[in-house]
Amino acid sequence: MCLMTDATILVAPRELKDQVERASRVLLCEASTANRLAEDITFCEINYSQGISSWLEAITSESETFNKIQRSSLELRIPSGRKSVDINFDPSLSFAFLARTLHTQEKYGITWSCDTEVIYGNSKIASVNLKLDNPISPKTNQKTIDALSTGLRVSLLEWNQLDKIASQFLLSEEILDES
């Protein structure tokens, strides 16, 4: 959510994904992790907003916390033979890093709930309950369809911060010549 007083910029979802992926690689994330983070943040920005700000907050946290955030969505699964599970996060983390995985699981009959009400991507989550109790059902996401056709309005300040980090991904010819 951009405040009315914030300047915004219209970007394509693919542009956002590419910038988050590049910036994550600059921060030494492995390629598949950077890709997953980029998909998570893009999904969140489309559906909940505050994805970019959650990512910017995460990269300024302690490295151990950032490492936990990178692995968080991988923990969202129900163990074999169980119908439900509670997953706890310490410290709590922004919903932005869980949203895409949780919504994907809905397609496979898994419902979810969080310990706090999720309004925006930066909502802090300490625990998630997963429950296998629905029939499998394909879902279309109108917000994604709209974002792909008309673009996404994001905070210009946050976009510029992200762009500054991502721009370091490409090396200048001078640096390449030195190596």
Image: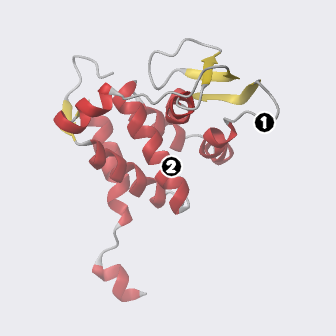
**Distance CA(mark 2)–CA(mark 1):** 22 Å
Q: Which mark is residue 145?
A: none
The percent coordinates of residue 2 (x first, y second) are 29, 22
In the picture as drawn, the residue positioned furthest to the right comes out as 81
Is there CB contact under 8 Å for labels 2 and 1? Answer: no
Q: Where is residue 154 in the image (x, y as percent from the top left)?
A: 27, 32
* Residue topped by disc 1: 79
In the rendered view of the protein, which quadrant contains the N terminus?
Answer: top left
The residue at 43%/39% (across/down) is 41
Q: Is mark 1 on a helix, strand or loop?
A: loop
Q: Is 108 on the left-hand or right-hand side of 157?
A: right
Q: What is the crowding at mark 1: few (fewer than 14 residues within 10 Å), some, or many (at least 20)? A: few
Picture quadrant where residue 71 is located: top right
Please, what is the three-letter code of the amino acid marked with disc 1?
Pro
Q: Which amino acid does label 2 sit on?
A: Arg
At a point 27% along the width and 33% down the height, the residue shown is 145
Q: Which of 124 and 161 is in front in this view?
A: 124
Q: In this view, does 96 lie to the left or right of 153?
A: right
Q: Nearer the viewer, mark 2 or mark 1?
A: 1
Res. 96 visible in picture: yes
Which class describes the residues within 10 Å of circle 2: few (<14), some (14-19), or many (20+)? many
Residue hosting label 2 = 36
Residue drawn at x 33%, y 37% as measured from the top left: 158
User: Which quarter of the rendered picture does the C terminus lie within?
Assistant: bottom left
At a point 51% along the width and 16% down the height, the residue shown is 118
Residue 41 appears left or right of 69: left
Secondary structure under tag 2 reads: helix
Q: Note whether residue 153 is visible.
A: no
